[in-house]
Image (tube, rainbow, N blue to C red):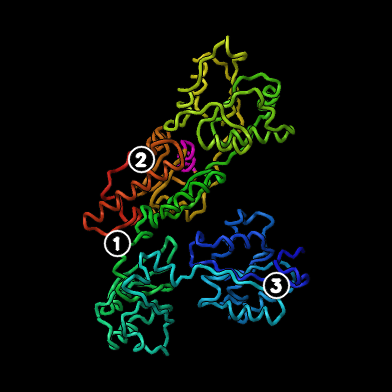
Amino acid sequence: MTNKSPNNGHSELGWVSFVGSGPGDPDLLTVRAVELLRRADAVVTEAPEHAAMVRTLLGLTEETEGGPELIDGGFGEDGQPMTHAARAKVVVKRAKRGGHVVRLMNGDPFLYASGPEEAQACAKAGIGFEIVPGVSSVSAVPAYAGIPLTTKDHREIAVVTCGEKVDWSRYADERTLVLLSGVGLIGEVAAELVAAGRKPETPVSITRVGTTTEQSTLTSTLANVAADVRAARIAPPAIIVVGKVVDLRQTLSWFETKPLFGWRVLVPRTKEQAPALSQRLRSFGAVPEEVPTISVEPPRNPQQMDKAIRGLVEGRYEWIAFTSVNAVKAVREKFDEYGLDARAFSGLKIAAVGDKTSAALLDWGLRPDLMPEAENQSAAGLLEVWPEFDELIDPINRVFLPRADIATENLIAGLVDLGWECDDVTAYRTVRAAPPPAPTRDAIKTGKFDAVVFTSSSTVRNLVGIAGKPHASTIIAAIGPATAKTAEEHGLRVDVMASSPSVEALTAALADFGAARRTALVEAGQPVTKPSERKPAGRRARAK
């Protein structure tokens, strides 16, 4: 195995990078952490979610071959959490086999973590190592709760791990306190701080699973926090902040006030197309759940496509019109099959239906000659800008239209009206995917999803076909009028429609809806709830 370590002196032994994974949000990984994970021969994880984080970062799935060896450093064979010494043995044992080992640790390796002990074990074994700091939950979780630990008026902080041996009289002043492992002891701690001289009305915040979309923050006072924590049934992990800085959360809360914060959003798309949509939803605070409803497969009869590709190479066409990313992919795969490259498009005019399709062409080295206006990226928009056939200018009047087997006929009819002849070729077909697991089907039918985003009519038909109709309390978002019409035909009431047919416009429209809904609840003096927490009594009945 090639040693990828930066220490060329250790040719037989491996090299260990102790890498902080941050407090929970994978976007808080440092640039250095990402680089090392991509180069790693092995990754020793700590938290259950680390393996999934690495696979996502590297674009791997459970079925994908390759990638680093993943070693569980969090729990032993008996299912019990490993001690620091046991984890150190796992790291040293793997490093002795050679290669680059990343020890992925929660938060920061040298801050309230076992990094020092494990690094000392490596040093004792003669194994080279480095420390890659991570964002610590001590600072990150309060920041995500909208609570600054220091201000111009509050410059001192103290971080305390709660336990029986803490002398709380030492913290009777006005310093901001950050308390770790304190949820179960907060009543006793609060009482001792008050007894030591802290004011009973001193603000307190408790933030659970900070920096994740499950984050929740309770604000209280030293006098009331014990009862409030019991009433809210708050459980670890949580970061507690004590001090006047907690009051700033009223104006600085930014994460938990995102328009779709904590919304469970169903994404019924093809596996290839879902990630970009999911990432956009996450940026608005949502928790997307991808359910494949469409599988893109080659046409049953490839001969028509083969004939069209030969015609393209022989100069049979004046235009080729791409109406989707999948169409670009299908033609590109045929080119690869025949050993062709983008030079075969020389002299051919290329049309693309929108930005995503254009981007797929640019990735292939092709630049579209014709695209619809930005506000109408659709087949109809493409027709609006398509030139009429002019026999004095156009040497050939034929258009190659590679597309799905269930595409609409409007584009062909429009091109014929403009004087063009179309070779309408099935480049790929969309088929219904297998039904999702039973828990997902149940969640769809019983309203456990807050919203569902439909990106095409086929996603509507296929989702209803494989999983049933979404519950009446679920917000329905459609990418355009045709998709909305199909949803309504299936008895769904469309709440949100994109201003233009794009993932960006669709997610932005849903976020605007969520923001308006939140504002209305706040102005009405009602608690901010998610659609799944409000039963449909207040909504109009959907069409049957």
Relative to residue 427, is residue 472 drawn left or right? left
Amino acid on which disc 2 is placed = Val
Q: Position of residue 368 (x, y in %)?
A: 57, 29
Which residue is disc 3 drawn over? Answer: 94
Which residue is disc 1 drawn over? Answer: 251
Q: Earlier in the sequence, mark 2 or mark 1?
A: 1
Residue at left offset 57%, top offset 44%: 272
Q: Are marks 1 and 3 in contact (CB under 8 Å)?
A: no
Amino acid on which disc 1 is placed = Thr
- Foreground residue among 310 and 196: 196
Q: Position of residue 251 (x, y in %)?
A: 29, 61
Q: In the displayed orientation, state which residue is furthest to the left.
A: 524
Which marked residue is nearer to the observer: mark 1 or mark 3? Answer: 1
Which numbered circle lies on residue 494? 2
Please tell me how many numbered marks the rendered image carries.
Answer: 3
Q: Position of residue 35 (x, y in %)?
A: 62, 60
- The answer to if 459 sits in the magenta stretch is yes
Quarter of the image for residue 243 reads bottom left
- Which quarter shows the N terminus? bottom right
Q: Position of residue 293 (x, y in %)?
A: 52, 44
Using the numbered discs, state the Cα–Cα distance from disc 2 to disc 3 in whole angstroms: 54 Å
Relative to residue 417, is residue 315 drawn left or right? right
Residue at left offset 46%, top offset 70%: 137
| Badge 2 density bin: few <14, some 14–19, many ≥20, Cα 10 Å | some
Look at the image and give the residue range highlighted in magenta: 456-465
Residue at left offset 31%, top offset 65%: 249
Amino acid on which disc 3 is placed = Arg
Residue at left offset 47%, top offset 43%: 463
